[in-house]
Image (cartoon, helix red, strand yellow):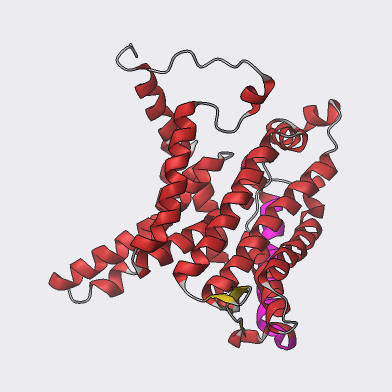
């Protein structure tokens, strides 16, 4: 049972990891993350890199929806903007990854600013339709602006390198992807506790009251779109160096729906919930794939019937969590922690 957890200074009260137990667990997690690529197989490394990229992109959407209450159905488009910008700068101008990835994030930020401009006048379903339109427009640009994007053939990108050391395997690129993702998660944690983060939450809870107490609604909503798009753009840049290729089919509407599912299942407004939702929504299709393989032993045509089940499961999970656990997996974990904090004196 946790006792004596009092604060003696402002620094201890503002710390991200406030208790010794939390700091110890985070240290163990850091060591495990460093050791993981040396002991995991190729498939697990691929999943780890994939989940890190998706978690970073989903975190941007959670900042927009969970923090500020602005819905978006075009998040994959901003990821695509960052990916294409990174690929063009790397393949055609020869810029290193430490310039091309932030530049891709900056261009995605600009795109988010333009798309988010109508958010002062519209919200809810109307804003969702506006962002959906952006998704369709950017998909058309990715496919048809062949002189820049390469059309349906896409663009190939050379592996990232540091002082001649090529990050050309999943094991090597793992440290770049996970490192960038961890840094941006820490930035998001501090953003939520900052003046702008509190303004985001105020706009989400009651925008009229927030404006009365001095919050600039237009600037706050635009900033939320910009930060969300920046995270998506950085995730897109990491995706480029992870897969070494970028094509229009990589950023469809279904990816935007997947990001939305991650945010809802993990927990709206929860940073750690983004991680839980990413892991959960990434492993569910893998488990379905494994189940399909086992079913083929006794049912040879199982794949043709079970393959579309992924989209059905995605939709069902969103509905189930909205009805039975609207705060997502983050709240489930909080209840588990509260139980063991008070056990055996919980009643």
* Residue for point 57% across, 75% down: 165
Quadrant where the C terminus sits is top left
Residue 215, located in which quarter of the rendered image?
top right
For residue 337: magenta? no
For residue 132: magenta? yes
Residue located farthest toward the front when viewing the structure as drawn: 163
In this view, 53 is above or below 251: above
Quadrant where the N terminus sits is top left
Report whether residue 53 is seen: no
* Residue for point 57% across, 66% down: 253
Residues in magenta? 126-147
Residue 166, located in which quarter of the rendered image?
bottom right
* Residue for point 52% across, 46% down: 274
Q: Nearer the viewer, residue 68 or 43?
A: 43
In this view, 249 is above or below 284: below
Report whether residue 216 is seen: yes
The picture places residue 325, in percent across and down from the top left corner, at 44, 36
Q: Nearer the viewer, residue 18 or 77?
A: 18
Main secondary structure of the magenta stretch = helix
* Residue for point 77% across, 33% down: 195
Left or right for 321, reference 12: left
């Amino acid at each position: 049972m946790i006792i004596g957890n009092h604060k003696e200074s402002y620094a201890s009260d503002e710390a991200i990891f406030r208790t010794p137990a939390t700091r110890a667990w985070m240290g163990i997690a850091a060591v495990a993350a460093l050791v993981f690529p040396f002991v995991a197989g190729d498939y697990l490394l691929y999943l780890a890199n994939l989940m890190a990229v998706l978690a970073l992109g989903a975190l941007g959407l959670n900042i927009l929806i969970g923090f500020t209450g602005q819905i978006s159905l075009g998040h994959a488009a901003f990821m695509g903007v960052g990916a294409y910008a990174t690929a063009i700068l790397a393949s055609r101008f020869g810029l290193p990854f430490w310039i091309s990835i932030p530049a891709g994030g900056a261009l995605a930020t600009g795109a988010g600013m333009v798309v988010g401009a109508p958010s002062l006048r519209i919200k809810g379903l109307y804003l969702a339709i506006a962002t959906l339109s952006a998704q369709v427009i950017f998909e058309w640009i990715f496919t048809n602006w062949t002189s820049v994007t390469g059309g349906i053939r896409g663009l190939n990108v050379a592996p990232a390198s540091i002082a001649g050391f090529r990050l050309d395997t999943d094991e090597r690129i793992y440290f770049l992807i996970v490192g960038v993702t961890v840094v941006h998660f820490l930035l998001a944690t501090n953003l939520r506790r900052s003046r702008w983060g509190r303004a985001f939450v105020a706009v989400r809870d009651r925008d009229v009251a927030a404006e009365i107490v001095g919050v600039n609604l237009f600037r706050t909503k635009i900033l939320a779109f910009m930060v969300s798009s920046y995270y998506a753009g950085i995730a897109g840049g990491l995706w480029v160096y992870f897969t070494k290729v970028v094509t229009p089919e990589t950023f469809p509407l279904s990816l935007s729906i997947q990001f939305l599912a991650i945010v809802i299942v993990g927990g709206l407004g929860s940073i750690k919930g983004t991680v839980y939702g990413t892991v959960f929504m990434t492993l569910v299709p893998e488990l379905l794939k494994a189940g399909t393989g086992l079913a083929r032993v006794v049912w040879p045509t199982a794949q043709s019937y079970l393959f579309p089940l992924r989209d059905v499961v995605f939709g069902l999970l969103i509905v189930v969590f909205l009805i039975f656990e609207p705060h997502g997996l983050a709240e489930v974990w909080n209840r588990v922690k509260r139980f063991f904090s008070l056990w055996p004196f919980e009643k």
